[in-house]
Image (cartoon, grey):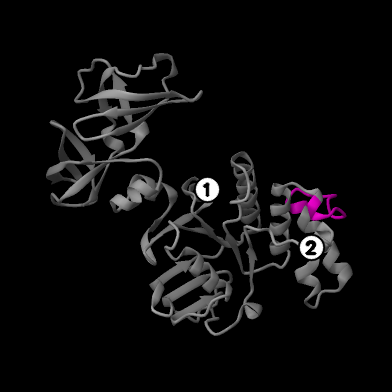
């Protein structure tokens, strides 16, 4: 199975990485499909950058095997792996033109200079920088420089494109714009890409699949919607988007629906389990409706903070289950700080995670 040649695929087989006595990556096995954009997400020190550097050949494995395109590359250095990397620092040569920067990887290889420069200009057009080839990097904005770095990586026609925190040096609005461009380029070329970030929103915006890492191993992997709607732990629920994680009691399960007691009310929550278990209830901020009065099952809360943000109002409430964060899009009926309200939970959108 390991020797099957599938262009653009990546396979880790029980890969471990140690730096002396420090375990940077525990026994990791994963498969990345051709044309898939997989994001490695997690807090600092979780092992995501180490995993990327192992794919690139910038670090050697302590134990296990790595396959790229069905070829065992475990013992090959970066030079002999058909991968390209985009760094957060851009790493452009300041004395070379933009076109020369993009062509650099081709010219140090066997590509004739004229052909390399033509491919460079095609690459610049691909990232929306047609006509910028004769400029110096210092004459470009940060977002434009990052697109040059992407073009330089893509023109090498790698089997796998690696992106290490590529947007961390950009401001918030520019990050959103550039990440959309990177995703469009990846999809249009059918590139296999591995993307490292600590930004949850960024990961959800660009990924086919997210691998959340914690303590040098995989905590959960799945599509953005899977991780958001079906977290497997309190860590995932709290790490992927905002979440209120509260105590509850699961009193019964029937047909994958749990009967749950929380703050004196009974609710029904979807579950993948067949029997009651010791759980916490995950309530996303937008899955709470506030009202002064309601006939539906609800939890009382006192508003301690209210912030109008233009497209939404954010509230913090004291409640019998602790502090609750709420996002409300009903702008016409803003509740005031100090108000006592009822919280109605959207039961179909709740999740249970093991304690």
Vertical side of 112 occupied by 307: above or below: above
Residue at x 19% of width, y 37% of height: 268
Query: Which quarter of the rendering shows the N terminus?
Result: bottom left
Q: Looking at the image, is mark 1 or mark 2 earlier in the sequence?
A: 2
Residue range corresponding to the magenta coloring: 125-138
- Disc 2: which residue: 101
Vertical side of 101 occupied by 300: above or below: above
Q: Position of residue 314 (x, y in %)?
A: 40, 27
Kindly report the secondary structure that dominates the magenta region of the rendered protein.
loop
Residue at x 15% of width, y 51% of height: 277
- Disc 1: which residue: 202
Vertical side of 191 occupied by 309: above or below: above
Residue at x 29% of width, y 18% of height: 291
Q: Position of residue 200 (x, y in %)?
A: 46, 48
Question: Is 181 inside the magenta-drawn segment?
Answer: no
Left or right of residue 247, residue 146 in this image: right
Give the crowd class for mark 2: few <14, some 14-19, many >=20 residues within 10 Å: many
Cα separation, mark 1 vs mark 2, equals 27 Å
Q: Are marks 1 and 2 in contact (CB under 8 Å)?
A: no
Vertical side of 185 occupied by 110: above or below: below
Q: Would you say residue 62 is visible in this rendering?
A: yes
């Amino acid at each position: 199975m390991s020797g099957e040649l599938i262009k653009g695929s990546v396979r880790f087989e029980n890969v471990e990485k140690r730096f002396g006595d420090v375990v940077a990556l525990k026994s990791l096995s994963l498969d990345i499909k051709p044309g898939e954009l997989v994001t490695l997400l997690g807090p600092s020190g979780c092992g995501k950058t180490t995993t990327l550097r192992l794919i690139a050949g910038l670090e050697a494995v302590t134990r296990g095997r790595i396959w790229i395109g069905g070829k065992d590359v475990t013992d090959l250095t970066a030079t002999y792996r058909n991968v390209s990397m985009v760094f957060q620092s851009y790493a452009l040569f300041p004395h070379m033109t933009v076109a020369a920067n993009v062509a650099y990887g081709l010219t140090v290889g066997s590509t004739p200079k004229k052909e390399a420069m033509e491919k460079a200009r095609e690459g610049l057009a691909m990232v929306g920088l047609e006509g910028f080839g004769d400029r110096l990097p210092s004459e470009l904005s940060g977002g434009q420089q990052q697109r040059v770095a992407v073009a330089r990586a893509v023109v090498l026609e790698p089997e796998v494109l690696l992106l290490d925190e590529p947007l961390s040096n950009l401001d918030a609005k520019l990050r959103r714009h550039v990440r959309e461009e990177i995703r469009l380029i990846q999809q249009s070329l059918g590139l296999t890409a591995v993307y490292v970030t600590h930004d949850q929103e960024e990961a959800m915006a660009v990924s086919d699949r997210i691998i959340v890492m914690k303590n040098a191993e995989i905590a959960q992997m799945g599509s953005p919607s899977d991780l958001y709607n079906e977290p497997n732990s309190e860590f995932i629920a709290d790490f992927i988007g905002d979440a209120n994680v509260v105590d509850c009691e699961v009193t019964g399960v029937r047909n994958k629906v749990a009967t749950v007691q929380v703050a004196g009310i009974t609710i029904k929550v979807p579950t993948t389990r067949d029997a009651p278990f010791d759980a916490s209830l995950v309530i996303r901020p937008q899955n709470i409706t506030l009202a002064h009065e309601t006939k539906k099952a609800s939890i009382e809360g006192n508003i301690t903070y209210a912030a109008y943000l233009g497209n939404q109002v954010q509230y913090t409430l004291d409640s019998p289950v602790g502090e609750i964060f709420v996002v409300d899009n009903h702008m016409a009926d803003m509740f005031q700080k100090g108000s006592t309200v009822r919280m109605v939970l959207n039961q179909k959108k709740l999740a249970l995670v093991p304690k």
